[in-house]
Amino acid sequence: MSALKNFLDEQNRLIAFPAKRKVKLEALFYLAGKFEQGRRYTEKEVNALLNQWHTFEDPATLRRELYQHCFIGRERSGAAYWLEPQQPTQEELEKKYG
């Protein structure tokens, strides 16, 4: 998480969403680690969790990025979210998006 440290404040919250793909992926891995495996979250709970771990007040972007990169799943209606049981690897994502 070396490159990501430049994007964290003293409370380990993201202060900006990185633009560079590699660091952005590190940020997504970091945020995914804050979710509990096997727990279902409402959108409001996901937003609250993400708000605890960033300072730039954009949980919708973070939620969307976590979903698009297969870290979290959701019901089609958006009524429930969960941490995917099998997380993507850094290598898989770099190959897919690199």
Image (cartoon, rainbow, N blue to C red):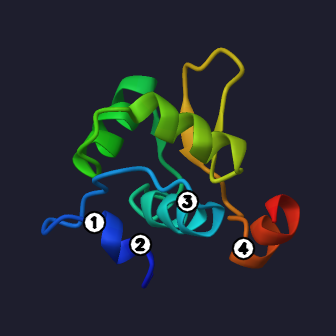
30 and 72: which is toward the camera? 30
Above or below for 1 versus 78: below
Mark 4 Cα-neighbour bin, 10 Å: few <14, some 14–19, many ≥20 = few
Residue 93 lies, in percent from the top left, at 77, 65
Q: Which residue is mark 4?
A: 89
Horizontally, residue 64 falls left or right of residue 9, namely: right
Question: Do the residues under discs 1 and 2 have CB atoms within 8 angstroms?
Answer: yes
Quarter containing the N terminus: bottom left
Horizontally, residue 24 falls left or right of residue 41, namely: right
User: Does label 2 or label 3 sit earlier along the sequence?
Assistant: 2
Above or below for 57 versus 7: above
Three-letter amino acid code at disc 4? Thr
Q: Residue farthest to the bottom?
A: 2
Three-letter amino acid code at disc 1? Leu
Residue at 29% from the left image edge and 48% from the top image edge: 54
Q: Quadrant of residue 68?
A: top right
Residue 97 lies, in percent from the top left, at 81, 59
User: Does label 1 or label 3 sit earlier along the sequence?
Assistant: 1
In this rendering, the label closer to the viewer, 1 or 4: 1
Mark 1 Cα-neighbour bin, 10 Å: few <14, some 14–19, many ≥20 = some
User: Does label 4 or label 3 sit earlier along the sequence?
Assistant: 3
Q: Which residue is mark 2?
A: 4
Q: Which residue is mark 1?
A: 8
Above or below for 9 versus 59: below
In this rendering, the label closer to the viewer, 4 or 3: 3
Q: Residue farthest to the front?
A: 19
Mark 2, secondary structure of its residue: helix
Q: Which residue is mark 3?
A: 24
Horizontally, residue 57 falls left or right of residue 42, namely: left
